Image (cartoon, helix red, strand yellow):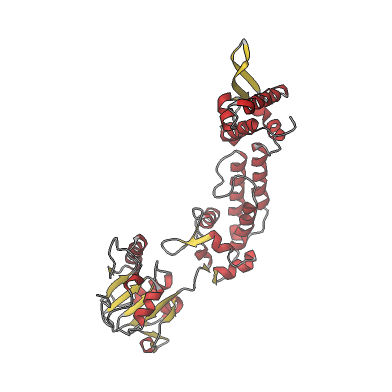
Amino acid sequence: MKHPAPVLEALARRYERRLAGRTGAASRDVLVEVEDLLRDADASEGDLRAVAEQQLREAEQAGILKLEPLHKRDRASLHQVRFSPANETSLFDLLGQSSPKSVRESLAKQFAAASALDLLPRWREGWMTWCERKRVAALTGKSVEPFDRHPSEANEKILALIPRLLAWDGESLVRFVSCVLCGDSKTLESLAVQDRDGEFRDKLRGKLGRLLGEITNGQIRALDDLGILPNPRFALVHGPMKIRLDGEWLDLGRLQGAFRLAEADIARADSVVTNARRCLTVENETSFHELAKLKSGTLLIQTSYPGSGTLKLLQRLPTELEFWHFGDSDEAGFDILRVLREKSGRDFQPLHMQHGRIPFEQESLGRPKCAHWPFYD
């Protein structure tokens, strides 16, 4: 046969899904109904069927497979194809494709080569052990998630990236780190996005976090743990608040507009006080700024899923404050309310949030109707 045959390609696909094709461990022949193969190849009838059956017979003559008739005396009536794993290479060579065994071997070589990459001494042993586990898993057809099961360029890039991530020193924003390590500001963000609790998680089941955790025995579980941050660690605030730094009071309530307070300053402040009666967290920054214009005397903090800077400030505020959250009236909005309660330890109550409200965005309420609590009718 000079050209690949759809019916043989169908056989190859079925073999790849069987234990023999996936792992190379099975020794029994693979039996497939001829009618199933013809259907898979869209060659069940007419001239296409005749051509497909002829191609099967040619493959049998070449020693690649065996055809079993429905009746021993009727060789023209094909019933089953018997394919031996020993003929794997011959079949895939005929189709001009890499055999499952060669794919597994090439994938294993990717992990073996990665084990020689340079790592910081503290991570070196864990890295080599991890690479060896992945190499063996690749050879035996076991899961190598979240890597591709074939030796892809994407695998190579992530394997090369991990040691450089583990060597990162100091806090930097993710886009800066991505430029330095990947040559592109968005590469890391395409691999990792913020999950619902505001921590870095990967789109593909937390790829980077999972891998870092496996390699470091759980010491590093996310990019945050390496000082690679989605945003600076700060709280966006407006309203009456004073903090005492190095023995001197700073009256932030005198500022006309909103201000960003770094987590480091919140943490090192001798004291954080407010004469506000209420603290209101606001999910969307657009609504936050509209409320800030009112200068209502309510302490406003902008946050969706709270970051570490926002949580640090909430924990330092006086416990006698009332805590309210103004968010979207959708599933995510109420989930943010839940997370705020759990992570801050404050008894947050919902403001202007109603289950099932359409439209659910808080901006749909329009501009605040009055300058004082609760701002809307």
Quadrant of residue 258 in the image?
A: bottom left
Quadrant of residue 94 in the image?
A: top right
What is the residue that sits farthest to the right in this orientation? Answer: 2
The count of marks equals 0
| Residue depicted at x 31% and y 75% | 280
* Above or below 211: residue 71: above
Give how far across and how far down residue 121 sits, in percent: 62, 60
| Residue depicted at x 34% and y 83% | 239
Give how far across and how far down residue 176 sits, in percent: 58, 71
What is the residue that sits farthest to the front in this orientation? Answer: 46
Give how far across and how far down residue 152 sits, in percent: 64, 49
Residue 120 seen from this side = no
Relative depth, front residue between 336 and 74: 74
* Above or below 74: residue 162: below
Left or right of residue 297, residue 189 in this image: right
Left or right of residue 242, residue 84 in this image: right
Quadrant of residue 140 in the image?
A: top right
Give how far across and how far down residue 337 sits, in percent: 33, 65
Q: Point out the image quarter for the C terminus.
A: bottom left
What is the residue that sits farthest to the top in this orientation? Answer: 73
* Above or below 77: residue 4: below
Q: Point out the image quarter for the N terminus.
A: top right
Residue 280 seen from this side = yes
